[in-house]
Amino acid sequence: MRNKYELKTEDQIRKMRVAGLLTQKALEAVRANIKPGVTTLELDRIAEQTIRAGGGRPNFQLVPGYYHTICASVNSEVVHGIPSNRVLSAGDLVSIDCGAEVDGWNGDSAFSMVVPGRDDAQTRERQRQSDVCEGSLWAGIAALARAKRLNEVGVEIEKYILDRGNYGILEQYVGHGIGRSMHEDPAVFNYRVRDQGPKVEPGLCVAIEPMITAGNQRTEVLADDWTVATKDGSDGAHWEHSVAVHSRGIWVLTAQDGGFEGLKPFGVTPVPLD
């Protein structure tokens, strides 16, 4: 049985916003340094330095057995890739997941991008896959703004993805609640399920994170016991934001603008708490 989750007060959501913005700052620092020749371990150090300089601590390091600040998943790796001395090459599709804890509250966010420096059919398809995954994230956030029940989010994510290609949607890995811990209840599915899920109400804070493949959705955990890769060798993409529902609307905690630009195509306007 899943545990009952905590609805956050508006003051608590404000504290989560601090953690969310520091998470976003770390990811932007990583993004600015993704180029051919950089290692994923170097990117990990950049993220950790950014978070600690901002007065937070990397919440991924609080997960038992994990010792890094980011997950860096390349090409057929979808999520949970461990930073290493692996050197990125032009045209690689890399997904970076990161989180920060500040004063006991958590942020969690992820993006995918193609390493610059190559332009061919493969890299263009990789960019399209990343774009579809990102668009599905915003479709899911927009659905949250209108939803009565949480699992309406997965319906819209799935529809957005399948309307744009024959992509696989990971079913074993889903989004989650967030707050005092990085991973809390409730689960946030990226596809249609029979159950309607919990009521969407003020204080609900969730991390929405679609994960898609260019082939089918079957994956395996590699020998390092962390990295999740596609069984068919197809590319993976992963996008994520932490989002709060409050008394006047929604606010994307891990986006600098609260989600204004991402939600604009969906006719949704996020509402800041202050």
Image: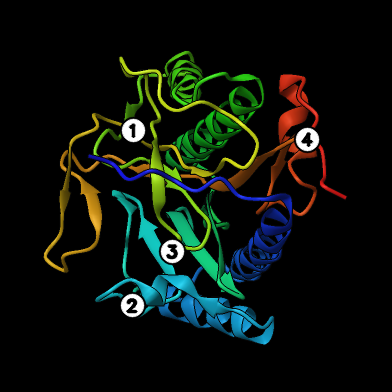
**What x and y, as percent, mark residue 25?**
68, 67
Residue where numbered disc 1 is placed: 214
Q: Are marks 2 and 1 in contact (CB under 8 Å)?
A: no
Most foreground residue, 94 or 28: 28
Residue 122: quadrant of the picture: top left
**What x and y, as percent, mark residue 51?**
61, 78
Q: Looking at the picture, does residue 14 appear above or below residue 251? A: below
Please give left or right for residue 218 compared with residue 157 in the image: left
| Amino acid found under the numbered disc labelled 1 | Ala
User: At 24% across and 39% down in the image, what residue appears?
Assistant: 172
Per the model, the C-alpha gap separating discs 4 and 3 is 37 Å
- Mark on residue 84? 2
- Mark on residue 89? 3
Per the model, the C-alpha gap separating discs 1 and 3 is 20 Å
| Amino acid found under the numbered disc labelled 4 | Pro
Q: Nearer the viewer, mark 4 or mark 3?
A: 4
- Which label's residue is closer to the chain start, 4 or 3? 3
**What x and y, as percent, mark residue 250?**
71, 36
Please give left or right for residue 191 compared with residue 6 in the image: left
- Which label's residue is closer to the chain start, 1 or 4? 1
Quadrant housing the N terminus = top left
Q: Nearer the viewer, mark 2 or mark 4?
A: 4
| Amino acid found under the numbered disc labelled 3 | Ser
Q: Looking at the picture, does residue 76 appear above or below residue 62? A: above
Q: Looking at the picture, does residue 123 appear above or below residue 159? A: below
Most foreground residue, 128 or 3: 3
- Mark on residue 99? none
